[in-house]
Structures are given as structure tokens and as C-alpha cells.
């Protein structure tokens, strides 16, 4: 029927016609007539995927639907309607598609895919081009739109869709791609923003600002991004929460660190350009659920701090390398007050393989952590796994400085001077805030090599180092309120710390050696008086401060048990006695000097014949040298 109408319109001319979707195209004259609906049910013939293109464009393959730049929503809607109810894909070749109405359909699992920035959809700048309605499984990828953009459902996914005045109000998942000027053509073809290598922070900031307030992913592809000004994430302050959270800034990797192998072509590097004290990236919390990962932040000997973090919470920082900062590689701080809605400090964040290397000045440090002691807002319960924190060569430079912080865990950490020689400077430097003398407190370093040692003033509650590596000549800490154990098992502490001994024999018999260490699983106290069996030898000087025992069965009858600590055969004030009916824990305190070459005996005396019992004993003290 349509062929007869077309022939009538163009006269008695021999023509060849091609039916494609809602149009009839004459091969000889190029005349196009838009039809009200598809002539055939194309979906039943070619499956769940249709291609769409523009008229008079030579594509590698002929599109299933051809648009002419006028009311192209007619053809697009027809293609969408032709999909089976189970969904499918519409793939658009490059071109400028002009719509006069929103394209939508109440089916699930629809993909609208473009050919990168060459695919552009426009209407009046205010009307949504496509709407997912309340459907699930809709995907929008790899095209540009005017300000009307898209209407997303909670389940929609957006990948590489560029819009210059994007204002998303839905909670759909959003991913934007920002390509460096040195990115590959393939990377650029799917990017939402392409940088020119001069002020690339402009494009990165635009992508961050274009995310919905609930966040999304910014993928940085390509090697080098030159940043003339600071990139900011969030708008929080001392007075208010950030209105934006959930921003995830992800690069392609950190490549090679100092003295390591790696392919520089795989590195995503943000380089600070121009003279400015600003950081490269500043996170303005309180905010949550953010991420910065897989990139190098290069201060270029220009900025004071490469990464400034204000009050992130439940966020993650992974595989980051910061370099060439003039003051600190990373500053991690809480806000100075609790804004409405905030009841905790900057905490529950994960730092995995985050390193600071190649300081930009001799006085530059690695990681700085602080809060506000007067307002009792601090950095707490954060976990650092792996990472090198390299300081400058100045004697006052610190690899890590802890101020008003508590309950942070550091595992497999290396601190060192930038020239990797000597112990000058501070591996970990502790600063006790005057308003809160118990801080910094309860921070624990596990299996870490802290070249430069631990110095400063610890909070009175104490900080732990288990185990403390001394292989590279790290000095054992001597400041107060620091305690731990070296990799060789040496216990140390300032005004606290411990040497522990669990000793005894089995039944009425001892283990048979005059100097011995006994399993901590618990053993029976001897039935008779013993004066020389439970000896402890050490080559370190200690002050013994407490003696604790646990007896699980009372002596019974009229019997008794007494346990006394002796030094070089002389009794000390550290003695406990169990009467006939007594059992359980007993502790006695004192201050007994032990010079390091003495012998310590725990001696048992009995009154009568006490019942057999299990005994555990602990001697506690601190190293005095």
C-alpha cells in the first residue's frame, strides 16, 4: 500500500524502495516519508537489538531506523515499542538527534547506548530525553544530552553520559568518565569530559559537581591530569554537614613507587601546576561513603599538602601515592565542632596501601592526624594497612604525627627518611594536647618498621607497638606511656609495659630444671616448700610493679599457700597468701628493682598439706633503661 502511495507522489519513475522502521527511503531520489508506525514487527525478525542512525550518513552498516533531525522521538519511540516485553537494546550511531517528546516505555531491561560524544540528543533544554519511569534494569551509556537529560529510576545505571548542566535529583547509580589529554582514542570516545592538559581540574570538578547529592563514580582515564586549582569533594564545615556524600574518584593505578617496578603508562597522576599553597584534592566533610583510589597525587614541589581530608566517615582510600608536598603529604583532621547530625569524630575509614613519598622539602612530613581537643572531636577508629610514610631529611621532620587521635590501627607501616639513611627525624611523633592529656591514646602499630623511632609526648593512657621492628637500627622507645614488644620478644614500656611469667610444677613434683619457662596453659602448684625451681632470667633492667596469682582450688582444712617474688635470693614485698578457704585472683603492687643480671624466683611455701590446685602467676613491670 505504502509503495503505491509513494509512487503516486514521485510520478512514474522506476524506483527501489527500502522499508526501515517508520520510514520509506527511495534509493534514487532520497525522498523520505515518515510513517505513523512500523510496517512490520521487526523485533520478531531480528531479535532484541535495533540500530538507529541519521539520514544521509554513510555508516558501516545500515541502521534499522533512520532519523532526519526533525521529531526524531517518533523513530526512537517506534524502535523502543518494537522491542519485546522482555526488553532489549537500542544502539545509536553518531549524529544529532532532535526530540520533541520524552521517549519512554513501561518495560524492564532496556539499554540506550550511543557511540560516545558523537551521539547527541536534544529537545528544549528542559524536557527529559528518555525516562526509565519506575522500571528496573535500564542502562544509559556513551552519549551526550542537552540540559533536559534523563529521568532515572532507583535501579537505573548511567555510564559515560555527558550533560553540561546536569542536575540529577534521582538516586540512580551514576558513573562519569573524565579522560586526560593523553588518553587513548577509545577512552576519549566514551568519556563525558575530555581534558586539554592545562587546567584539567576544571573538568574533574565539573564531573564531581554533576553527580547527584547521593554520589556516584568519577573514573579518571589516561596518564596525566594537570591541576591548576584545588579539586574539592563536599561542602561541609564546622557548622554543617556536607550536602554531598558518596563521591568515588577512581584512577587507573599508581604504577611504580620509589625503587619498585611498574609501567608508567598505567599510572593516573594528578599533578599540581602553578604557585599555590592549596592541596590537589580537599575533602570537605563531615561526609561519608566516599573513595579516592588508584592514582598518584603529585604536589610538584608546589602545594603544601597533596591530600587534605576534613572529617570523612566510613570512607576508603586505597592504592594512593602522594609525592612532593612541601609540608605534609596527607593531612587528616576532624572538624573543630560537632555540626547538627554529627555525633562522632572522623572515623571508621580504611587506608589501604596509601603512601607518602619523595617529600618536596627537607622539613616535609608524611601523615598528620589531629582533631580539636577543646571540643573533644578527634580522629578515631581508622585502619591503615600497608604504606610507606617518608619524611624529609631535617632532624625535626616526622613521618607520622598523631595529636588528638585515639584507637587507630596501623599495620605493616614503614617510616623512613627520604634518603633512606640514618635515624634522624621522627618515625612516629606524638603530641599531647594540653586540654586532653590522655591523648593521643590507644593507637596500635602492628608489625611495622618505624625508622626514626617513636618520640614526643604520649597521652597518659598509652599507645602500643606490637611487634616493634629493630632490624634497621630503630631505637626502642623510652618515652613515658609507650609499651610494646620487639620482634625478638623484648617487652618495653615507659611508665607501663610488662614482663610476664607463668610458672609452676605438676602435683608435688617440679619440672626438673632450676631455670625454666612453663606453658601458660596452667599447671599445678607444688605440694611442698620449694625455693629454687621457678627462676626467671633476663638481660634487661626492669622495675617490677605488680605480682598477680590465680589459684583455682583453695588449700582446704587448716592449710595455706604463700607465693613470693625473690630477687637474687632475697624476698621482696611482692607476696600473696591464700588461706584455707581462699581461691581465685590476688594482686599485690610495689616497686622492686631488677638490674638485668639478677635472678628472679617465685617461691612457694605451704602450711599443712594443701589440696592440689592449678596456679597461674604474672609478674608485671616496666623497662628502666
Image: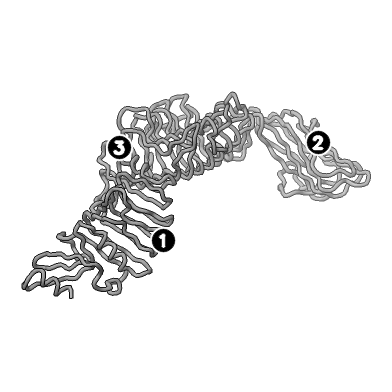
Q: Nearer the viewer, residue 175 or 98?
A: 98
Which numbered disc, 3 or 2, marks the residue that appears first in the sequence? 3
Image quadrant holding the C terminus, namely: top right
Q: Nearer the viewer, residue 363 or 207?
A: 207
- Callout 3–callout 2 Cβ contact below 8 Å: no
Which numbered disc, 1 or 2, marks the residue that appears first in the sequence? 1
- Callout 1–callout 2 Cβ contact below 8 Å: no
Q: Nearer the viewer, mark 1 or mark 3?
A: 1
Image quadrant holding the N terminus, namely: bottom left
The residue most toward the right is 558
The mark found on residue 564 in the picture is 2
| Quarter-of-image position of residue 463 | top right
In the picture, measured across the screen, residue 75 lies left or right of residue 586, that is: left
- In the rendered image, residue 170, in percent from the top left (x then y), is placed at 41, 50
Residue beneath the point at 17% across and 65% down: 33
Graded by Cα atoms within 10 Å as few (under 14), some (14 to 19) or many (20 or more), the crowding at tag 1 reads: some
Q: CA distance from mark 3 to mark 2?
A: 71 Å
Q: CA distance from mark 1 to mark 3?
A: 41 Å
In the picture, measured across the screen, residue 146 lies left or right of residue 488, that is: left
Graded by Cα atoms within 10 Å as few (under 14), some (14 to 19) or many (20 or more), the crowding at tag 3 reads: many
Give the residue number, with chain letter if any, for mark 1.
Answer: 135
The mark found on residue 226 in the picture is 3
Amino acid at each position: 500500500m505504502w509503495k503505491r502511495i509513494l509512487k503516486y507522489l514521485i510520478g512514474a519513475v522506476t524506483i527501489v524502495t527500502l522499508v526501515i522502521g517508520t520510514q520509506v527511503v527511495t534509493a534514487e531520489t532520497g525522498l523520505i516519508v515518515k510513517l505513523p508506525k512500523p510496517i512490520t514487527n521487526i523485533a520478531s525478525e531480528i531479535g532484541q537489538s535495533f540500530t538507529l542512525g541519521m539520514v544521509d550518513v554513510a555508516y558501516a552498516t545500515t541502521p534499522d531506523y533512520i532519523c532526519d533531525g526533525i521529531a526524531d522521538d517518533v523513530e526512537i519511540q517506534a524502535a523502543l515499542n518494537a522491542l519485546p516485553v522482555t526488553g532489549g537494546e537500542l544502539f545509536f550511531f553518531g549524529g544529532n538527534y532532535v526530540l520533541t517528546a520524552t521517549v519512554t516505555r513501561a518495560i524492564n531491561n532496556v539499554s540506550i547506548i550511543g557511540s560516545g560524544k558523537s551521539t547527541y540528543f536534544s529537545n528544549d533544554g528542559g524536557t527529559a530525553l528518555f525516562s526509565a519511569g519506575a522500571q528496573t534494569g535500564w542502562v544509559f551509556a556513551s552519549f551526550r544530552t542537552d540540559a533536559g537529560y534523563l529521568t532515572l529510576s532507583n535501579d537505573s545505571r548511567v555510564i559515560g553520559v555527558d550533560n553540561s548542566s546536569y542536575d540529577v535529583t534521582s538516586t540512580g547509580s551514576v558513573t562519569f568518565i573524565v579522560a586526560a589529554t593523553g588518553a587513548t582514542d577509545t577512552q576519549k570516545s566514551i568519556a563525558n569530559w575530555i581534558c586539554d592538559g592545562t587546567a584539567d581540574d576544571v573538568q574533574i570538578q565539573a564531573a564531581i559537581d554533576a553527580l547527584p547529592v547521593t554520589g556516584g563514580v568519577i573514573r579518571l582515564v589516561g596518564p596525566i591530569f594537570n591541576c591548576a586549582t584545588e579539586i574539592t569533594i563536599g561542602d561541609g564545615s564546622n557548622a554543617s554537614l556536607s550536602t554531598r556524600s558518596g563521591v568515588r574518584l577512581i584512577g587507573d593505578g599508581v604504577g611504580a613507587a620509589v625503587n619498585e617496578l611498574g609501567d608508567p603508562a598505567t599510572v593516573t597522576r594528578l599533578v599540581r601546576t602553578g604557585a599555590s599553597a592549596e592541596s590537589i584534592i580537599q575533602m570537605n566533610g563531615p561526609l561519608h561513603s566516599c573513595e579516592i583510589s588508584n592514582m598518584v597525587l603529585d604536589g610538584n614541589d608546589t602545594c603544601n599538602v597533596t591530600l587534605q581530608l576534613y572529617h570523612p566517615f566510613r570512607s576508603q582510600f586505597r592504592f594512593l601515592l602522594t609525592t612532593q608536598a612541601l609540608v605534609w603529604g596527607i593531612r587528616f583532621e576532624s572538624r573543630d565542632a560537632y555540626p547538627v547530625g554529627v555525633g562522632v569524630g572522623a572515623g571508621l575509614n580504611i587506608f589501604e596501601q596509601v603512601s607518602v613519598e619523595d617529600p618536596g622539602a627537607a622539613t616535609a612530613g608524611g601523615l598528620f592526624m589531629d582533631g580539636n581537643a577543646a571540643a573533644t572531636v578527634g580522629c578515631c577508629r581508622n585502619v591503615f594497612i600497608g604504606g610507606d610514610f617518608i619524611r624529609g631529611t631535617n632532624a625535626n621532620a616526622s613521618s607520622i604525627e598523631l595529636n588528638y587521635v585515639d584507637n587507630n590501627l596501623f599495620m605493616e607501616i614503614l617510616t623512613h627518611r627520604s634518603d633512606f639513611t640514618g635515624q634522624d627525624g621522627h618515625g612516629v611523633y606524638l603530641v599531647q594536647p594540653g586540654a586532653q592529656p590522655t591523648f593521643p591514646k590507644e593507637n596500635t602499630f602492628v608489625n611495622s618498621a618505624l625508622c626514626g623511632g617513636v618520640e614526643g609526648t604520649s597521652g597518659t593512657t598509652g599507645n602500643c607497638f606490637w611487634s616493634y621492628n629493630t632490624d634497621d637500627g630503630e631505637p626502642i622507645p623510652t618515652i613515658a606511656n609507650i609499651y610494646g614488644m620487639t620482634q625478638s620478644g623484648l617487652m618495653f614500656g615507659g611508665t607501663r609495659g610488662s614482663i610476664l611469667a607463668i610458672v609452676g610444677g605438676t602435683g608435688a613434683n617440679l619440672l626438673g630444671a632450676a631455670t625454666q619457662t612453663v606453658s601458660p596453659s596452667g599447671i599445678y602448684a607444688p605440694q611442698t616448700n620449694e625455693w629454687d625451681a621457678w627462676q626467671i632470667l633476663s638481660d634487661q633492667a626492669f622495675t617490677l610493679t605488680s605480682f598477680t596469682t590465680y589459684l583455682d582450688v583453695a588449700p582446704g582444712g587448716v592449710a595455706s599457700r604463700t607465693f613470693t617474688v625473690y630477687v637474687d635470693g632475697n624476698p621482696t614485698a611482692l607476696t600473696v597468701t591464700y588461706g584455707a578457704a581462699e581461691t581465685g585472683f590476688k594482686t599485690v603492687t610495689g616497686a622492686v628493682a631488677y638490674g638485668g643480671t639478677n635472678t628472679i624466683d617465685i617461691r612457694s611455701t605451704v602450711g599443712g598439706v594443701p589440696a592440689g590446685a592449678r596456679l597461674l602467676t604474672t609478674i608485671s613491670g616496666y623497662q628502666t633503661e
